[in-house]
């Protein structure tokens, strides 16, 4: 009985049905038969096998690029179907790295069915109906709200930005008419920073963990395509995220959640060293913003890391916050065709703008640069800085993620087809409090000030109106202003030639330059006149961690406050923020005695 997991099953491109086909094909049955040492592959029926992962492997050392599958085999089903295989199956031994015996049930469901089954099976009764404010409707806030509302809490979701419909119009006005709405933009609004994004759902917190799978299945419940459960590098794209968020909103409202868009939390209400509510104002009306006090039993703070005013708001309450390392750098863009050629060589023609079998090529590079000699660091990582590509958007575009017109920062987004002619990625270097010290910046908000400093310099270098400073990769390496015309860019608000090599402190620039030279060894052609660097990429992850208790998720210094998600320093991406929201939802419910009998 049970499931056997078979991994690393390779199927070469010409025998595979293609990137969008996620079922069992003949070539895959052949690969399975080989691993099982099953003599005749055609005798193996497809029914007992389920594809749980499919990725594309085009590493240069391979003779031929291939799709790599992981498959679960339901042993019982195989025996039911094929009595002749009984003896054979009973002799199978797990082979290290290829077959892994699965003891547990394979599937957990989406969050809604998991909670409702638990409520039914364990007869969980909602004892109290605490009033909870969730501040921020990014992935962390949405998932915390979902768990709390499913468990029976009276939830109010407060969001300074707008619902996706109006947010879409505000973003349109920014891209076309250079009008930046301070409260409704690429960072603020329904779905949070990840809505107008590439929608990559890759995470470093364990792809197969129950919590990650529960998040993925919940996204499918709200309309994401099922292939995100199987793809090695799942992504949604902005066009799929928007309807998904509408369905998510409808479900929350059906559960009785009050959603307040265009409402900004400006302050906490604190009595006897305990948060008892929030002060909010109308974020759409800066001039006549009447404020209102709203009382709650708990406040979940899921505000993301662009809400710098919220960090400042916490300082007078002595909420414990510690500076955190993060990374800064530039966003590089190349023609997508160039990246396809670098990664796939002859196979590049098969990509055909996302329609072919082969996915548009991406890349991920990491190098350690010695702090002192600026050479590749091999011995000690303690004295080195890591330089890496981040948030790569194949077939995407560079977008403006500023929330204030005097500060300029960028990121990348794409649509589900990833069919634009450009490929962009952040190239960043880690910075720590030692770097903040060099600018005389100290205290918990030093990292925020560090980001701000370089965002202001970038705005000045671009010359205003959200024009970004740019430089070709070649010229950046040679410390030279790009004098001939810059290569074309997907960034819609203009790129102006500038001395990006003078923007960051010298040691950051040199680390970036050395890393780029090393990337060239892995990706020959990366250093090119067609490669255009854009400034600046500063909001890679939170510069702060708001300290909280590991079990209760409550702030260690202020009762009733629950800091979660990326802004609190506990996540770095859509999926990990959602998972943090999910766990936080359960923790808050537990603390407030929401369900009799425990959760
Ligand atoms: P956020 O998503 O930042 O949400 C916080 C919410 O709180 C916002 O909606 C904000 O308006 C609201 N808020 C803030 N202050 C207040 C206040 N005072 N009152 C009321 N509401 C408030 N990650 C990936 O994993 N894959 C990607 O492909 C990807 N692409 C990205 C592309 C772009 C352009 C950007 C900007 C980010 C991208 N990210 C991506 C990062 C990802 O979006 C974040 O890691 C994730 O959204 C963090 O989730 P969160 O819920 O913690 O915070």
Image (cartoon, rainbow, N blue to C red):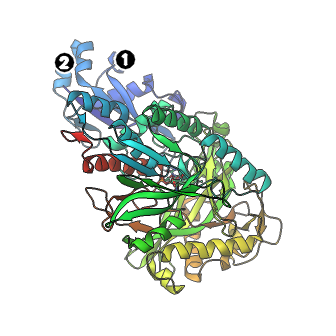
- Residue 503 visible in image: yes
Numbered label attached to residue 110: none
Seen from the viewer's position, the closer of residues 594 and 383 is 594
Q: In the displayed image of the protein, which residue is found farthest to the right?
A: 484
Percent across and percent down for residue 388 are 51, 64
Q: Is residue 173 left or right of residue 446?
A: right
Residue at the spot 58% in from the left edge and 42% down from the top edge: 237
Mark 2: C-beta under 8 Å from nearest atom of ligand 1? no
Residue at the spot 35% in from the left edge and 18% down from the top edge: 47
Percent across and percent down for residue 7 are 34, 38
Relative to 1, say whether 209 is above or below.
below
Sequence-earlier tag: 2 or 1: 1
Crowding at dot 2, Cα within 10 Å, few <14 / some 14-19 / many 20+, comes out as: some
Percent across and percent down for residue 560 are 33, 58
Q: Is residue 494 left or right of residue 217?
A: right
Relative to 62, say whether 369 is above or below.
below
Numbered label attached to residue 86: 2
Separation of marks 2 and 1 at Cα, in angstroms = 17 Å
The secondary structure type at the circle numbered 2 is: helix
* Circle nearer the viewer, 2 or 1: 2
Seen from the viewer's position, the closer of residues 502 and 379 is 502
Residue at the spot 46% in from the left edge and 38% down from the top edge: 231
Percent across and percent down for residue 486 are 79, 64
Q: Is residue 381 left or right of residue 162?
A: left
| Image quadrant in which the N terminus is located | top left
Numbered label attached to residue 42: 1
């Amino acid at each position: 009985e049970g499931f056997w997991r078979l991994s690393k099953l390779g199927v070469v491109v010409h025998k595979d049905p293609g990137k969008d086909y996620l079922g069992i094909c003949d070539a895959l049955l052949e690969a399975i038969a080989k691993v099982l040492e099953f003599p005749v592959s055609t005798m193996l029926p497809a029914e007992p096998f389920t594809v749980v992962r499919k990725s594309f492997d085009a590493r240069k050392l391979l003779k031929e690029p291939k799709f790599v599958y992981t498959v679960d085999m339901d042993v019982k089903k195989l025996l039911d179907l094929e009595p002749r295989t009984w003896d054979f199956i009973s002799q199978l031994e797990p082979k290290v790295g290829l077959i892994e015996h699965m003891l547990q049930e394979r599937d957990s469901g989406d969050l809604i069915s998991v909670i409702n089954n638990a409520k039914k099976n364990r007869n969980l009764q909602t004892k109290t109906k605490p009033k909870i404010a969730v501040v921020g409707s990014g992935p962390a806030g949405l998932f915390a709200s979902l768990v709390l509302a499913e468990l029976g809490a009276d939830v109010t979701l407060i969001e300074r930005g707008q619902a996706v419909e109006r947010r879409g119009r505000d973003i349109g006005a920014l891209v076309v008419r250079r009008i930046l709405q301070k409260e409704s933009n690429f960072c603020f609004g329904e779905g949070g920073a990840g809505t107008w994004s590439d929608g990559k759902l890759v995470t470093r917190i364990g792809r197969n963990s129950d919590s990650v799978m529960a998040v993925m299945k919940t996204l499918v419940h709200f309309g994401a395509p099922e292939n995100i459960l199987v793809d090695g590098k799942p992504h949604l794209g902005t066009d799929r995220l928007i309807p998904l968020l509408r369905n998510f909103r409808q479900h929350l409202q059906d559960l009785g959640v009050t959603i307040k868009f265009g409402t900004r939390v400006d302050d906490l209400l604190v009595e006897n060293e305990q948060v008892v509510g929030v002060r909010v104002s109308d974020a759409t009306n800066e001039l006549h913003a009447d404020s209102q006090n709203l009382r709650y039993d708990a406040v979940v703070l899921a505000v993301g890391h662009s809400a710098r005013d919220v960090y400042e708001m916490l300082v007078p309450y002595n909420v414990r916050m510690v500076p955190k390392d993060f990374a800064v750098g530039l966003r590089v863009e190349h023609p997508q065709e160039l990246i396809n050629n670098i990664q796939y060589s002859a196979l590049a023609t098969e990509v055909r703008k996302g329609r072919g079998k082969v996915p548009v090529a991406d890349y991920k590079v990491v190098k350690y640069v010695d702090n002192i000699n600026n050479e590749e660091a091999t011995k000690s990582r303690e004295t080195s800085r890591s330089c890496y590509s981040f948030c790569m958007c194949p077939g995407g575009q560079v977008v403006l993620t500023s929330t204030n017109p005097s500060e300029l920062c960028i990121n990348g987004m794409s649509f589900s087809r990833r069919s634009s002619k450009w490929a962009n990625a952040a190239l960043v270097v880690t910075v720590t409090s030692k770097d903040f010290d060099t600018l005389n910046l100290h205290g918990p908000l030093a990292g925020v000030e560090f980001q701000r400093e370089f965002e202001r310099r970038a705005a000045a270098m671009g010359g205003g109106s959200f024009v970004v400073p740019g430089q070709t990769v070649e010229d950046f390496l040679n410390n030279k202003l790009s004098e001939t015309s810059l290569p074309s860019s997907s960034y819609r608000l203009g790129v102006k030639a500038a001395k990006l090599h003078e923007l960051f402190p010298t040691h950051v620039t040199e680390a970036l330059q050395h890393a780029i030279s090393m990337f060239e060894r892995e990706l020959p052609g990366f250093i090119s006149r067609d490669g255009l660097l854009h400034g600046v990429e500063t909001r890679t992850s939170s510069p702060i961690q708001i300290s909280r208790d590991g079990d209760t998720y409550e702030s260690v210094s202020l009762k009733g406050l629950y800091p979660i998600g990326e802004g609190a320093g506990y996540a770095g991406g859509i999926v990990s923020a959602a998972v943090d929201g999910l766990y936080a939802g359960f923790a808050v419910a537990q603390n407030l005695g929401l369900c009799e009998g425990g959760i």
